[in-house]
Structures are given as structure tokens and as C-alpha cells.
Image (cartoon, coloured by chain):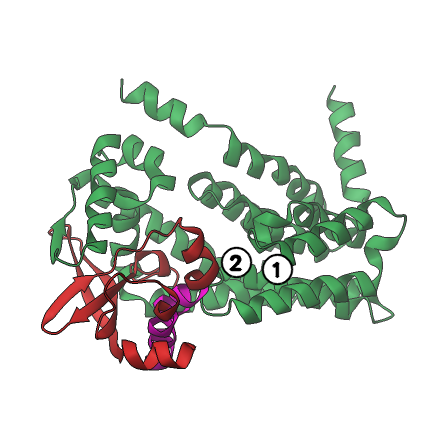
């Protein structure tokens, strides 16, 4: 992914908690020790090679997080950067996404 | 004075290729967090082995040392396969090549042949990938990089007619994409940056293509004689703008091992490039120039 706008640092990984019809963005602090210890590598792998398996692994790692109100589902999206040099406009296109039942992954984690 | 410099250059040229190349590689590995990142499992063994190899007489050419270093790099490469920086793969290949070469009787010849092919293939694959990447050939890649990468801020402000605050605001806009509600942003650009982009793009294409050809040409062809000068040209021009001194250092170390005895004064010039890569990295002269012209 070198020599292209779609390189690793320019990809965006978004995580959401789904509560019924409501989609809530899960704010991730990448400087948080929890992120560094449990999520960092899986996050980067999902970003670089966003297969369903890698995205599911990332979603599963959210079972280690404590939620005041656990979501019904965890949704992961990986987006790549697209740059139009004429207009200098940047958009992000979805590369892959997955949704996993929180109940299922938290039971599997136990 | 002239005689003094001539003698120093002659001395540099008389240094054994194998010793120079291996020790220069080990100096890089002493700063192992540059090449392995900050994970202690990888940088600590590489740092200890490299330091011992530089201190203990003759240890630098022990095949066991290089197999051990290669083993650490292989472990790191396997565990970080998907997101390891492309330059770090070259460290792994180089450590493996040295370990294998040291297992042969004619170490210098084997290492030189491997080094030459390795440099040729590095640039061949790099240039093939660049041609396959429409972002690169169209100039989009460097255009976007100059507008959003803090490492190129001096070059962009000096030659691209965008201010530091505009680049700062571009970076903030991009970070807002982490917030899912944003669909698109428009970066602040300039018409001059397109010219800069074209220059840097085509400089990279031409020099990398020439390096691939010159290093992969059979040694008997006279044209291949100029390969080391192009390698020097590549290091001195590319790393002036790209702050990747660890790769510049590594490519020089690999380059030194394949210089032939009759190629005077190539080795001395390559060795002289080493401090230049550090000057490029640490002396903020681009910032001084940028500040001076943007007053």
C-alpha cells in the first residue's frame, strides 16, 4: 500500500454500537493503555487487510470493553481515502464492514 | 590539503567491503527501535546482538549472529505482516542474505551478488508498483502527501505555496473523518503544488527505473559501471525530501557490499553519504530555508 493515497495511515476504522435502530459511534482513544494492549494490533490488521475474519476479530475484542449499556450489535467499518487532485476533495469509500452480535461475542469471551 | 583528502579517500576505499557493509548495518541495528519499532521483544535482542558484534573482535562476521538477527526480524515480520512498513521487509531480507552468505566459503562474492540483485529487485518492484498505482503516476499521491503529511511541511511551504496553518487545517479536517458523520472535505491546495508534485513524481520514476536497470544489468556491460553513482544520486536527492534516514542508511550498507575493487572511488563516496543522511534527518535546514523565504 505504499505510493498510493490508500495507504495504511490514511485508512479509517470506525466502530459502532447498534442499539435497536440507533447507531452510536464508539469513541476510541488510541493513546489509552487498553487500546494499546488489546486492540492496537487487531485494529491495524483490520485496517490493512479488512477481511470479514479480521473485522470479526476486531469486533470480538470489544467484548473486553465495559459498557454502561451493552449494545445489541457491534459494527465495524473500514474506509479508504480517495483524493481528487483537481478539486482537492477527499472522500472515504467503504472497503468492508461487518456486524456481530454483542451477546454472542461476550458469551464467547467468557 | 589536497593530498590529505586524497589519502583519506584512498583509505576509505581500501576498507574491506564485507567489514564495512556489515558494520554499517550493525550501527543501524544499534538504533534498533528505528528498524523494529518500539516493541521490546524485537528491539532488545537486535540492540544487544548489534552492540556485541561491534565490540567483540570478529563477531560481526559470525553466521550465528546474523541467523539470530534474521530470526528476530522474521518473527517480527510474521507477526506484523499486514501492517509492517515496507522498508522493514528489506532489513529482514538483508539479514537473511548476510547469514546465508556467511555460510559459504567465498562470502564476499556471494554477498556482493546477492546485494546487487537485491537492490535491483527492490527498485524493480518499487517501480512496477508505482506504475500499477494510478494515484502515483497521476501525481495524486504526492499532491495529497504534501497537503496532509507533517513530515513534508517544509517542502510544501517552500516550493508549494501553501502555508503551515493551511497544512495544519488540512490535517485537522482529515482527523474529523474519524467522526463518522462527515462525508467529504476539501483540502486547501495551490496551483504551484501541482508543479512540485509532477517534479517529485517523475524524479522518483526516472531514478528508480534507472537503478533497477543498472543493478540488474550483467556486470560485464559497461553501463552497469555507473550504478553506484545513481545510487548516490538517489540517496542525496530522495532523502533530502523524505525523512527516512534508516532506509537510506541500509541501502548504502547494501550498496557498499557490492562495489568491485576496480570501481574507484565508489565505496568512499557511498561511505561519505552516511553522515549526509543523518544531516538530512536532524539538521532543520529545510525549515530554515522555509522560514527565510516565507518571512
The image position of residue A85, as x and y in percent, is 17, 53
Residue in the picture at 83% in, 71% down: B103
The image's mark for residue B91 is: 1
Residue in the picture at 76% in, 71% down: B100
Q: Is residue B178 visible?
A: yes
Q: Name the residue under label 2.
A: B87
Which quadrant: the C terminus of chain B? Answer: top left
Viewer-side residue, B220 vs B258? B258
The letter of the green chain is: B
Magenta span: A41-61
Viewer-side residue, B48 vs B199? B48
Q: Does the magenta stretch include residue B116?
A: no
The image position of residue B182, as x and y in percent, is 12, 55
* Badge 1 vs badge 2, beta-carbon distance below 8 Å: yes
Residue B46 vertical position relative to residue A100 in the rendered view, above or below: above
* Palette colour of chain A: red
Amino acid at each position: 500500500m505504499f505510493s498510493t493515497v490508500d495507504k495504511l495511515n490514511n485508512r479509517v476504522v470506525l466502530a459502532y454500537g447498534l442499539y435497536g435502530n440507533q447507531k452510536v459511534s464508539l469513541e476510541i482513544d488510541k493513546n489509552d493503555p487498553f487500546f494499546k494492549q488489546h486492540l492496537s494490533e487487531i485494529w491495524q490488521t483490520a485496517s490493512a487487510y479488512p477481511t470479514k475474519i479480521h473485522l470479526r476479530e476486531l469486533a470480538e475484542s470489544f467484548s473486553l470493553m465495559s459498557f454502561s449499556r451493552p449494545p445489541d450489535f457491534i459494527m465495524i467499518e473500514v474506509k479508504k481515502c480517495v483524493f481528487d487532485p483537481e478539486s482537492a476533495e477527499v472522500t472515504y469509500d467503504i472497503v468492508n464492514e461487518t456486524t456481530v452480535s454483542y451477546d454472542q461475542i461476550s458469551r464467547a469471551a467468557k | 590539503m589536497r593530498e590529505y583528502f586524497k589519502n583519506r579517500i584512498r583509505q576509505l576505499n581500501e576498507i574491506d567491503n564485507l567489514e564495512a557493509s556489515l558494520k554499517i548495518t550493525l550501527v543501524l541495528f544499534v538504533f534498533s527501535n528505528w528498524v523494529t519499532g518500539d516493541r521490546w521483544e524485537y528491539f532488545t535482542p537486535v540492540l544487544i546482538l548489534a552492540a556485541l558484534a561491534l565490540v567483540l573482535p570478529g563477531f560481526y562476521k559470525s553466521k550465528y549472529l546474523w541467523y539470530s538477527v534474521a530470526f528476530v526480524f522474521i518473527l517480527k515480520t510474521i507477526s506484523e505482516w499486514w501492517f509492517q512498513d515496507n522498508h522493514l521487509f528489506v532489513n529482514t531480507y538483508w539479514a537473511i542474505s548476510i547469514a546465508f552468505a556467511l555460510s559459504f566459503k567465498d562470502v564476499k562474492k556471494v554477498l556482493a551478488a546477492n546485494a546487487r540483485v537485491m537492490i535491483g529487485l527492490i527498485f524493480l518492484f518499487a517501480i512496477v508498483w508505482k506504475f500499477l498505482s494510478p494515484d502515483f503516476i497521476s501525481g495524486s499521491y504526492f499532491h495529497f502527501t504534501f497537503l496532509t503529511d507533517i513530515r513534508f511541511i517544509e517542502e510544501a511551504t517552500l516550493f508549494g505555496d501553501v502555508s503551515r496553518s493551511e497544512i495544519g487545517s488540512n490535517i485537522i479536517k482529515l482527523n474529523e473523518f474519524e467522526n463518522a458523520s462527515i462525508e467529504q472535505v476539501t483540502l486547501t491546495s495551490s496551483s504551484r503544488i501541482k508543479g512540485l508534485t509532477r517534479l517529485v513524481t517523475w524524479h522518483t520514476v526516472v531514478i528508480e527505473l534507472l537503478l533497477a536497470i543498472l543493478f540488474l544489468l550483467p556486470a560485464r556491460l559497461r553501463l552497469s559501471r555507473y550504478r553506484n553513482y545513481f545510487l548516490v544520486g538517489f540517496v542525496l536527492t530522495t532523502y533530502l525530501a523524505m525523512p527516512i534516514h534508516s532506509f537510506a542508511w541500509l541501502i548504502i550498507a547494501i550498496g557498499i557490499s557490492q562495489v568491485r575493487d576496480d570501481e574507484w572511488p565508489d565505496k568512499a563516496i557511498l561511505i561519505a553519504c552516511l553522515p549526509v543522511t543523518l544531516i538530512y534527518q536532524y539538521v532543520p535546514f529545510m525549515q530554515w530555508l522555509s522560514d527565510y523565504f516565507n518571512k
